[in-house]
Image (tube, rainbow, N blue to C red):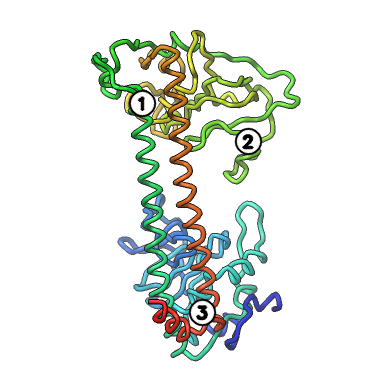
Amino acid sequence: MSSLTPFSSNLPLRPLKFVAPLRGEKVDAVPSESEYLGLEQFESWTGRLSGVELQQPPEGGANVFAKDDVLFGKLRPYLAKGWTADRAGFCTTESLVLRPQEAEPRFLRYCLLTSEFVEAVNGSTYGSKMPRADWSFIGALKVPCPPKLLQERIANFLDEKTARIDALIAEKERLVERLHEYWAAMSAEMVVRGIRPCATYIETGIPWLGEIPSHWQLRSMKSLFRLVAEASVDNHGLQLLSLYTDIGVRPRQELEERGNKATSTDGYWMVRKDDLVVNKLLAWMGAIAASSYDGVTSPAYDILRHQVPLNVWFYDALFRSGIYLTELKSKFRGIMDMRLRLYFEEFGVVKVPFPPKHEQDEIVLALRQRKERVDGLISHCREHIARLREYRSSLISAAVTGQLNIDDFKARQLEVA
């Protein structure tokens, strides 16, 4: 297998540029009311449109595509974005528009979205921040090119099999989503109502809280926490921390895949274990969490340290449950969502439940035990999803290269049935 032949194939191979040359039609501006597809409109690996709405209208030129053209994203090709057009339209110039001549369009799309082809294209990219592949390299890559009748039979086979696999994946993904919803609802209930029935409840008058057990208190955040601004002087051995809504406070080095690569700590604040960390810019999305680490973080965060005996992880669960978000949005300063900031002057007056310390400890322990069980179920689902995706990928590769005899495969499945 040479660098220009990513496939180990039992079928004839031809350079892509001969099988499906570039359409090469462009417009300087997309006509009004015309459909335009950006790369975000393509799902990775599936060959389907994502349903994501375009965030910004196109600027400048665009490529023209026609029905039965095959589109393939040359920007960040490791994302494996491709589509067989079922209509005419316009798309980003970061997407190659191929006009199949010796290929059945669906068969070609399956070839382009194999791991072998994507890895070969990705290995040719240039540019570190926005890696792109060049058509001169992509077009020279050899792809399977059996007779069109066989291509159609293989495409029909893969359409049927991948549809079934995709349905199983979607079912598992829905289960993961329901487990997340179940966990959010359960944690919200426990931090507001406790873990055991109470004889009497009191109405707080706060919409997001409703009733709380009558022996609990209702306290302002500033009565429980104080704002600390402990400047970091000697950062030797201290971790640089960041906060994300989905995973809480983590060392920055664990988050490099999210594009978080800053290393400077000049003017940063000290964070102590069990401090409550507030991302002032993203708190409206739920970016408030307790820290398990000693470290430093940027001035974009407020560091809150409890000044009365309490379990900070009770408040981590309270704020990460998201039930308070509606009220908090009224406390932000600024304009537009992405410019809103939450400052402690406003956050400090927010009223929160304050159970007895021993109940806070019990609730935190119960939450951790139940979270472990829920996480185990989610992990099992994700492992199953990963195996299904691996099977889908290997099935496509084997079918388009002729290493899988689809007639024998169907016969074996009938015998099993």
Q: Which mark is residue 399?
A: 3
State the SS at label 2: helix
Residue visible at 62% across and 43% down in the picture: 256
Image coords of residue 131 (percent x, y)? 62, 58
Residue visible at 29% across and 16% down in the picture: 213
First reached walking from the N terminus: tag 2 or tag 1: 1
Closest to the observer: 140 or 166? 166
Q: Which mark is residue 190?
A: 1
Image coords of residue 271 (percent x, y)? 61, 21
Residue visible at 70% across and 75% down in the picture: 3
Question: Which residue is the site of mark 2?
Answer: 252
* C-alpha gap between disc 2 and disc 1: 31 Å
Judge the density around disc 2: few (<14), some (14-19), many (≥20) Cα neighbours within 10 Å. Answer: some
**Residue 16 vertical position relative to residue 120 in the rendered view, above or below:** below
Give the number of callouts.
3
Q: Which mark is residue 130?
A: none
Using the rendered view, name the quadrant where residue 235 is placed. Answer: top right
